[in-house]
Structure formats: C-alpha cells, structure tokens
Amino acid sequence: MYRFAQEAEFINLKQGSMSVAEYDAKFNALSAYATDMVDTEEKQGRRFRKGLEDNVRTKITTYKEKDYADLVETANKVGKDVEEMFEKRE
C-alpha cells in the first residue's frame, strides 16, 4: 500500500514552490518507487522536465542536455535566475 502511494506521488510530482534542487531531491527519492518510469536517461529526463514549473521548463527547452545530470544542472541555473528575477520585482 505504501509503495503504491509513493508511486502515485511520483507520478503526480510537480516542482510547485520547491526550488529545483528540492524538486530534484524529492524526484530522486520517489523515483525508487517507479523505476520502470525512469529506467533510461531519456525517460528520467522527460519525467523530470515535465514536473518543472513552466517558467523554468520553457527556458530550458532550447538546451540539449547530454544526460539527466546535465538537465538538472541547467534547470538549477535557470531556476536560480528565475528566483532572482522574482525577488527583484518584490
């Protein structure tokens, strides 16, 4: 029962108000319960990208990451830039 709940949480995982680093940590923790969904770099990257906030995801669509680690690194950089932009507006 717990495993199914964790798998469902992974399937529905979105970045929301988390930083990219926090989202990545949660993504990796929960992905252990849905290994068939992330059993290749491509699947892992696609699922990670899908859960990112729009303002981060749209800014990294032009990047061609070689692997999941590159995708996370790029998303972290963009996420920090977006956070700084919003902080300056306040």
Image (tube, rainbow, N blue to C red):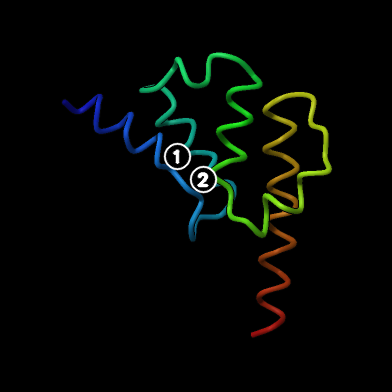
Residue for point 62% across, 31% down: 46
Q: Quadrant of the N terminus?
A: top left
**39 in relation to 68, above or below:** above
The image shows residue 26 at horizontal and vertical percentages of: 45, 39
Give the image quarter of residue 5.
top left
Per the rendering, the mark at residue 75 is none
**47 in relation to 62, above or below:** above
Residue type at tag 1:
Lys
Q: CA distance from mark 1 to mark 2?
A: 5 Å
Q: Secondary structure at mark 1?
A: helix
Residue type at tag 2:
Tyr
Residue for point 82% across, 40% down: 63
Give the image quarter of residue 4.
top left
For disc 2, the neighbor class at 10 Å (few under 14, some 14 to 19, many from 20) is many
The image shows residue 90 at horizontal and vertical percentages of: 64, 85
Residue for point 58% across, 48% down: 52
